[in-house]
Image (cartoon, rainbow, N blue to C red):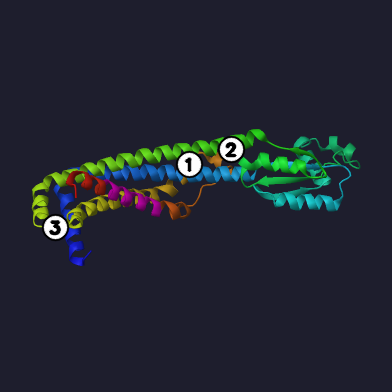
Amino acid sequence: MRISTFGYSMKQGVKNIRRNKMFSIASIVTMAACIFLFGLFYSIIVNFNYIVEKAEEGVAITVLFDEDTTKEEKEDIGEKLEAADGVLKINYVSAEEAWESFQDEYFKGSEEAAEGFKNDNPLANSDNYEVYMSDVSKQKDVVSYAESLDGVRKVNKSDVVAKTLTSVNKLVGYVSVAIIIILLAVSIFLISNTVTMGITVRREEIAIMKYIGAKDGFVRAPFVFEGLLIGLVGAIIPLVMLYFMYDKAVAYIMTRFSLLNNIIDFLPVMQVYKTLLPVGIALGVGIGFVGSFFTIRKHLKV
């Protein structure tokens, strides 16, 4: 496309927006609302996934050894577990550490009750590996693998937590896809209506242009630019708003629900926007292009 043609198309695209102010404003506002909701849901979803991932890192299975398992065999078991798919890390817990942990949990405030076991560790054969998951959905496979290893007596697991986290992840994924599809459909519909109005207003002018031999691309370009501009403006406005609202919203939640401070963390805004900014702009521009391009093909037959 020549520079002069590009300039003409841009100028006509802006002129189309001015001619159809009400529809253009309605399209920009709706696009902004859709991108805002998309950004809002995206921020919620990525933070929720981050919280779930942190929770998954705390989900561990406990691998207990046979009584006659040697130190070398235990180390070999540890190496195999650490290399297993879905394992984040492993932590060896000695019998002494297991007993200390048991006392902290069950004898807290009644330490004298544990004095009778001072020289006789009741958990002498309870040294183990705590195996932490990088993907909780693979816990079942890791458990089966651990149980198949020589020297392993028993594997303790938390099925309820693993299944709950896996189900929550799937549910969030399905809901996200459904919401995004609805928002995209609404945006495309409104931009399509705006472009249709522009075509109606300029129908006679377009007919003359076609009659004197104007190429299809020359006729189509102003309407495509119109859709692109609406999409771009409709994306930038909500993204700027969300950027300044994000930290304030997080601060409000942490202040209002102070109990959450020690339970969950939120992603910093820059980490969220590393993906949200390019995706949001691409969505706005992409929706503007699709809505205008296919509307022109339908109405102008060019």
Residue 264 visible within the image:
no
* Crowding at mark 3 (Cα within 10 Å: few <14, some 14-19, many 20+): few
Considering depth in this image, is 10 or 40 the residue closer to the camera? Answer: 10
Left or right: residue 267 versus residue 142 is: left
Q: Is residue 285 left or right of residue 297?
A: right
Mark 3–mark 1 distance (CA, rounded to whole Å): 58 Å
Q: Are marks 3 and 1 in contact (CB under 8 Å)?
A: no
Q: Position of residue 287 (x, y in %)?
A: 31, 47
Q: What mark, if any, has residue 165 been given in the picture?
A: 2
Can I make out residue 44 in this image?
yes
Q: Which residue does the image show at 29% across and 43% down from the upper left?
A: 188
Mark 3 element type: loop
- Please tell me how crowded label 2 is: few (under 14), some (14-19), or many (20+) other residues with Cα within 10 Å: many
- Relative side of 68 to 15, left or right: right
* Relative depth, front residue between 70 and 49: 70
The question of residue 110 being in magenta is answered with no
Q: Where's the N terminus, which quadrant?
A: bottom left
Q: Earlier in the sequence, mark 3 or mark 2?
A: 2
173 sits left or right of 65 in the view:
left
What residue is at 77 percent from the left and 42 percent from the top? 148
| Type of amino acid at the residue the image marks with label 1 | Ile
Predominant secondary structure, magenta span: helix
Q: Which residues are magenta?
A: 277-291
Say which residue label 3 marks: 214
Q: Which residue is mark 1?
A: 253
Q: Amino acid at mark 2?
A: Leu
Task: List the single residue furthest toward the top.
Answer: 160
Amino acid at pointer 3: Ala
